Image (spheres, grey):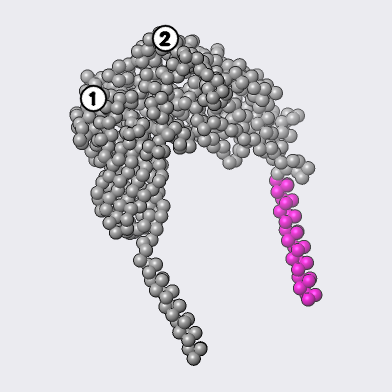
Amino acid sequence: MKTKFVLFFSLIIITTAILYSCKKENLEEGMTASETPLTPYTISSPNYMPQLHIPADNPLTVEGIELGRKLYYDTILSNSGISCSSCHFQSYAFSNPTVNSLPHMNLAWNNKFLWIGSEEGVLENAMIFEVEDFFQTDISKLNNHNSYPGLFKRVFQTTNITAHHVAYALAQFVRTQVSINSKFDQYLRYETMLTPSEMNGFVIYNSERGDCFHCHTLGLFNDNNFHNIGIDSIFAGQNKGRYNITLDSTDLGKFKTPSLRNVELTAPYMHDGRFSTLEQVVEHYNSQVKITPSLDPILTKPNHQFGLQLNNQEKADLVAFLKTLTDTSFITNQALSNP
Amino acid sequence: MRLLFYAFLVALVITLLGACNKNDNFFPEKIKLTVKLNHVIDGNPLVFDTLVFFNEAGNNYEITRLEYYISNIKLHSDFLGDYESNDIIYVDAANPESCSFTLNNVPSGKYNSISYTIGIDSIRNVSYYLPNTNENIGMAWPDGMGGGYHFLKLEGHYLYNTVSTGFAIHLGSNPFQVNGSFNQEFMLGYNPYQIKMEMNVNEWFKNPITYNLQTDGNYTMGSALLMNKIRVNGHDVFTLKNN
């Protein structure tokens, strides 16, 4: 009996010692015992948006998003005094009217980035490009900063900040730049009505009459794909588009479909900003499509016609509908502004 | 005497159990079947963006996009009965990963035919029935035109009066589902369990209706007449091929 008793207690002591040593090891690798766990953050979206996939190695946390937000607005990222926010203004849906930057909006659902898909995959890939290639961030400035080392340690449990950590924090913040509360979203939620002109524009948009929906798919209002929409008949320089990545002649003049959410705020339009108004854009599709071998087949209308043949009222209605995609709560959201 | 009775009882139970085990062997093994989808044009591999193909009407064409849903796959066996899958499978012919799927718990043995639907049955062809993904987000069919999903997107260019001109053969909305089948015996008896179904794209343009992109139309969406021509041609686009 005594032997059994001794054996039993020996086992408990050994088990406790093993568990304690495991715990100690984890704490040494990660946070200290006094720190509280990171706060998980979830993005909820309506059923007309695609399923959201967040990389397992970069889960959203309140602390990670805040760190990304701080970096987004901080010129420490560059060596020339600029930050992400220098080219992506919240009041323009995180685009820029002068340098024609693509808006930072709903990128969480994108898997191809920049006008010609220079980066593909998840946001982390795009952000690594921004940190290492675009900004060429001097990481030592972050490691020697008075507040960043503590913030990175808290979020990523690291005492050595790398470009990888910076990109992951930025990706977390950019993932929260979500615009899903436009007048059209409210209409879909039965919270408001569209005017007769807006409704007529929606019917044109979402039928073969205007045929916008094939590429600017409802919900995301893009299709994560590349198309030649007939704005050029001769391709040179940047106008070669996706060809500059693939060197495939069938990709000449193809560019990523931009989202039409907040399109009222993201002028000028097209990859080179050649159109300054939505009316000009609609007129392009209506009567100015240029025929080339790589022109998207969808641009050839029934009876082999090119151009939508919309009348003036229909064109005005289409523009009226596009303006229902403006999300004022997105451009005034304090959680996305300069901290 | 009693001992003898119990011994007899035990022997009987063992015998019955043994018989049961033998009967179990009568039931066919349930297997995981891999279905591979291949896409050709009259026996030639489908190469995208290459203006080298001709259809029955003589249209010189190329394909830039081939996407569709295949569902209600049914394997029919005179011996085993029918196996039916409820899965709805999205296929992008340009993406090899989407051109293969598995059917679970398929009884192994000899089969006589396969039937399938290109598209989604009317019960399930309603907007947002399927979870949206980045891959199939472009397959939604506008609510104003009936809602649900595109069943087929076959797009490309063809020579129209010597000019490369686009065509978009789209099917969607009830009742333009394509119900196809083929009678070919095949045996699911050896591992790896796999069959290959091959779509001949040119079958969309013939049998029973010779579809001419130039005279019938280059854009089917919104035209019940044109979609129906394509629908009836689709009944035999697939055949079974040797792996």
> SS for tag 2?
helix
Question: Toward the viewer: B56 or A76?
Answer: B56
Q: Nearer the viewer, mark 2 or mark 1?
A: 2
User: Which is the main secondary structure of the residues drawn in magenta?
Assistant: helix
Number of numbered discs: 2
Category of crowding for the residue at label 2, using alpha-carbon neighbours closer than 10 angstroms: few (below 14), some (14–19), many (at least 20): few
Would you place residue A327 above or below residue B34 in this image? above
Mark 2–mark 1 distance (CA, rounded to whole Å): 31 Å
Instruction: Describe the element under mark 1 as helix, strand or loop.
Output: loop
- Asked whether the beta carbons under mark 2 and mark 1 sit within 8 Å of each other, the answer is no
Task: Name the residue at the bottom extreme.
Answer: B1
Residue A20 screen position, x and y as percent: 75, 55
In this rendering, would A88 be left or right of B45?
A: right
Q: What amino acid is at disc 1?
A: Asp
**What range of the chain is rendered magenta?**
A1-29
The image position of residue A159, as x and y in percent, is 71, 38
- Picture coordinates of residue B48, whole percent (x, y): 32, 32
Residue B216 is tagged as 1
Residue at figure coordinates x 20%, y 35% from the top left: B208
Q: Is B93 within the magenta? A: no
Quarter of image, res A289? top left
Looking at the picture, do discs 2 and 1 lie on one chain? Answer: no
What chain does badge 1 belong to?
B
Kind of residue at badge 2: Gln
Q: Quadrant of residue A292?
A: top left
